[in-house]
Structure formats: C-alpha cells, structure tokens
Image (spheres, rainbow, N blue to C red):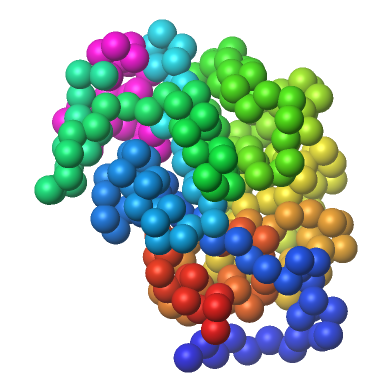
Amino acid sequence: EFQFIVNFTEKAMMINHENHSYIYAHRGATKYAAENTRLAFNKALKQKAEGIETDVQLTKDKVPIIYHDRLMEQLGYPSNHICDFTFTQLEQLNFSSYCQSVDAEGPITLKEFINSYRNKSRLLIEIKHRAWEDTSSAQIKIRQCLDIIGKTQNNDIVISSFSIICLEYAHQLSTQIPLIYNFRDAHSFFDVKNILARYSFLNGVCLPIHTLDTSLMHFLRNANKLVLTYGDKTHRDINKALYFKVDMLITDDLETALKKRGE
C-alpha cells in the first residue's frame, strides 16, 4: 500500500474544494486501442472515464487533427511530422496500424473530436506547438479550437499546452475556457510560482505526479488554481495523486485509478 511520508496539516487534506479527482483517459484507453483514435476514446467511455485527454497538431494545409508524437514513426514515417502532409494525404494512412486486431482508422479532425465527445465526456485538449512551427501556426490552432467549442462553455472543456504562446493568444482572444500550462519533469517550485506570477490569467497547471508535494499544493490551492497531473507509472503514483486530491488525474490505467478513487 501507499507509503508517502509527509506532515499533512488539516488544510492540506482539504485542498481540493470539490474533494473529487476527475479521472481522464490519457489519449483514450490505450491499453486496448491505438492512442488518439475513435476506438480508444469509445473504449475509455465504456470504462467510465470521466474525461478524455487528447492532442492537437496542424496538417500542411492547416487542418487541426488529433495526434501526439513529434514524428510519425508509428505510422511508418519516422522522419516526418504531421505538418509535412495534407489532411487528404493523411486520410490514406491507417492510424491504428501499429495496434494488432483492430480496424483501420483514418485521422480525426479536432472538429470531429469535439463535436463527437463534448456531450459524452469532459475534454482536455492539449495544443501542441513545436519548435519548427511559426507563431501563426499556434494562432491557427487556437482560433480553430475556440471557434469549434463556441461561446457556450461550462468548464467541461479545458485547453492546455506546454507552449505559453498558445495560451497567451487564447487569453488575448478573451476566451472563458480554462487555460492550463503544462510543466515537464525539470521544473522547480520557483518555476511554477514564476509562471503564475508572470501569466496570472492561467487557470491552473499540469504537473508530473512525482513533483507534487505539500508546499506546492498549498501554494496552488491558496492561489485558487486548478491542479492537473500526469505520469502514473505505478500504483503508488496514482495513490499519490489521489491523496493530494488533484482536480484531474490524466492516466493510462483507468481501471486502477477509478478503483482506487472509489476506495
């Protein structure tokens, strides 16, 4: 069982105002289907995931589609990026090709994803912005995402990114959708404080589970920020995230996370 040694105060045990960690499927139910495919999303819903996390990139002809990796190695193009192909060209590929015993699937546009799943699940949409892309690409992704979501928003859709350029542009467009900054492994408490001080419009942060600690959680709750977390490689990681009552746990192991949260 979980052995996380920390001196909790009563306040630390009550840092989540709703006292509920929502369980999000990381790119869908990837134990049973190719990631970021319709089958993966549908299976996640059958497993009772409360949210779906996915990734958005831009094709050569500026169509936002659902795909995670920098390179297309899984699809047989190890030296290419999504932005090297038009959407029509990508439609000729099988995005489930690396996963055995599943039907072939073409790419999913951001529009199809939002329209298909917004009424079935909470959605966490991560906007990818790579070093080789110019600022206009980030702006196109954000504009299209906000246009598809529309004006009616009840916090069931959240936008995140490792790129502050994307999030700052969304803020400039006066969106009411919660904006979350993603941190990688190499960050400190000071880095989190600095980002939130500089970009006060951010509604929260997404952090690797192993970086969570009492002081950081106190700070984020006192600042009234959402806390999302990812990187559950073991049951201990899931226990830790749930113990801290994060707002959203983004997981590859839905069954375990849902079971443990229900305990």
Q: Nearer the viewer, residue 176 or 72?
A: 176
**Residue 106 place in picture, x, y as percent:** 27, 27
Q: Is residue 20 magenta?
A: no
Task: Give the mark count.
Answer: 0
**Residue 165, located in which quarter of the rendered image?**
top right
Asked if residue 132 shows in the view, the reply is no
Picture quadrant where residue 119 is located: top right
Q: Is residue 171 left or right of residue 208?
A: right
Which quadrant of the figure has residue 216? Answer: bottom right
Q: Is residue 91 visible?
A: yes
Give the residue at x 13% y 48%.
100
Residue drawn at (22%, 38%) of the image: 96
x and y percent of residue 16 in the render? 76, 68
* 89 within the magenta span: yes
- Looking at the image, which residue is at 27% across and 49% down? 33
User: Looking at the picture, does residue 106 appear above or below residue 26?
Assistant: above
Image coordinates for residue 105, horizontal then vertical, percent: 24, 32
Q: Is residue 241 above or below residue 102?
A: below
Left or right side of 169 for 83: left
Q: Quadrant of the C terminus?
A: bottom right
Give the extent of the magenta segment. Answer: 67-90
